């Protein structure tokens, strides 16, 4: 896996990010050349992870409801992975009646800082018919602020992430910029990325397990969706019964996570480590997670895969710079 060296922006584009989590979206934004002026995150373990990996980042630890974006007026991009439970079936799809719904806070921040673009990520359930009115209301509120936008359903596997992980991304831009935006196209052109076995073989074998090669050969599909990261349900496991059955078909014991790779002489189905789960989520190997095993896995399980965030952020960047280039030529 590639290392996550910072890629300083040559374009001068800036962003603020809310609900940053452990940095999945932030890594994608950084790689696309956006300089973050602030990362807002509530979870202390995730904040510690961000600070550990990027000491130079301005991490604001606290509730986004208490955060003001007024000092960042004119920023290029407001991005965020707003909480998914209000719109997921596991979270009972309470939508606006769920206290964790932070779309209203995102709208407030848009009004305060008036960015050129907005990028908000959520679960596939957000596109369910039950939320049609909610989505239309959000778009209308942004319309009154001078923005146009659309919801996109993206599959992480189309962008090289070895996992079945559909994500909804809402991109909205100032009306004068929206015509320049084109959604990201799949990078693997209809082909699946590497299988679980190909992705994790070296990690499974690092402690000398003799069965790693055969295991990798049989784990010849991409991973099911990583779940089990909820604070209200579960711990360091790969999710409920259906999810664990899907992992078992790949030769993975999903009842819990391991502290390290299988040792020599190991027999049976291996468990994933946090590092293995992070690689399946698209994190680079040098991105480290703080906290105990449960806290670290929750950070991984709740993350926006960095390659998907990067693909969307690049298209936003291109739309903004295209407008700037056009204005320069016109002058």
Image (cartoon, helix red, strand yellow):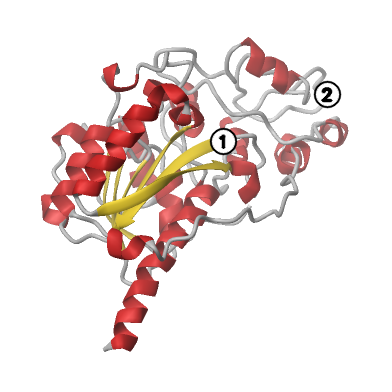
Q: Residues within 10 Å of mark 2 (few under 14, many from 20)?
A: few
Question: Looking at the image, which residue is at 32% across and 29% down?
Answer: 134
Counting residues from the start of the chain, the first of labels 1 and 2 encountered is: 1
Secondary structure of the residue carrying tag 1 is strand
Report how far apart the C-alphas of labels 1 and 2 lie in the structure: 37 Å
> In this rendering, is residue 293 above or below 316?
above
Q: Quadrant of residue 292?
A: top left
Q: Can the viewer see residue 60?
A: no
Question: Looking at the image, which residue is at 27% across and 53% down?
Answer: 147
Secondary structure of the residue carrying tag 2 is loop
- Numbered mark located on residue 166 in the image: 1
Identify which residue, 180 or 208, lies in the foreground: 180
> In this rendering, is residue 25 above or below 249?
below
User: x, y percentage for residue 39?
Assistant: 28, 46
Instruction: Name the residue tied to disc 2.
Output: 265
User: x, y percentage for residue 63?
Assistant: 21, 31
Question: Looking at the image, which residue is at 19% across and 61% down?
Answer: 74
User: x, y percentage for residue 91?
Assistant: 42, 16
């Amino acid at each position: 896996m590639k290392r996550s060296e910072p890629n300083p922006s040559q374009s001068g584009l800036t962003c603020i990010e809310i609900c940053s989590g452990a940095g999945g979206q932030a890594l994608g934004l950084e790689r696309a050349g956006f300089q973050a002026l602030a990362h807002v995150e509530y979870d202390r373990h995730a904040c510690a992870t961000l600070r550990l990996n990027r000491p130079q980042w301005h991490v604001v630890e606290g509730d986004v409801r208490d955060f003001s974006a007024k000092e960042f007026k004119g920023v290029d991009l407001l991005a965020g992975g707003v909480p998914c439970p209000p719109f997921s079936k596991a979270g009972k799809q309470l939508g606006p009646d769920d206290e964790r719904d932070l779309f209203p806070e995102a709208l407030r921040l848009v009004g305060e800082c008036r960015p050129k673009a907005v990028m908000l990520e959520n679960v596939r359930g957000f596109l369910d018919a039950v939320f049609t009115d909610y989505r239309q209301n959000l778009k209308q509120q942004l319309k009154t602020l001078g923005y146009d936008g659309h919801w996109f359903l993206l599959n992480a596997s189309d962008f090289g992430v070895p996992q079945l992980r559909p994500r909804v991304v809402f991109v909205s831009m100032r009306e004068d910029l929206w015509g320049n935006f084109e959604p990201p196209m799949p990078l693997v052109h209809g082909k699946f990325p590497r299988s679980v076995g190909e992705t994790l073989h070296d990690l499974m074998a690092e402690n000398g397990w003799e069965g790693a090669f055969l295991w990798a050969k049989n784990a010849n599909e991409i991973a099911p969706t990583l779940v089990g990261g909820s604070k209200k349900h579960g711990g360091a496991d790969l999710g409920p019964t259906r999810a664990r059955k899907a992992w078992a078909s790949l030769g993975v014991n999903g009842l819990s996570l391991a502290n390290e790779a299988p040792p020599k002489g190991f027999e049976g189905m291996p468990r994933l480590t946090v590092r293995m789960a992070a690689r399946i989520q698209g994190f680079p190997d040098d991105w480290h997670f703080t906290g105990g095993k449960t806290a670290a896995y929750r950070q991984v399980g709740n993350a926006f895969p960095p390659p998907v965030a990067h693909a969307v952020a690049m298209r936003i960047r291109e739309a903004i710079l295209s407008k700037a280039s056009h204005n320069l030529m016109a002058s």
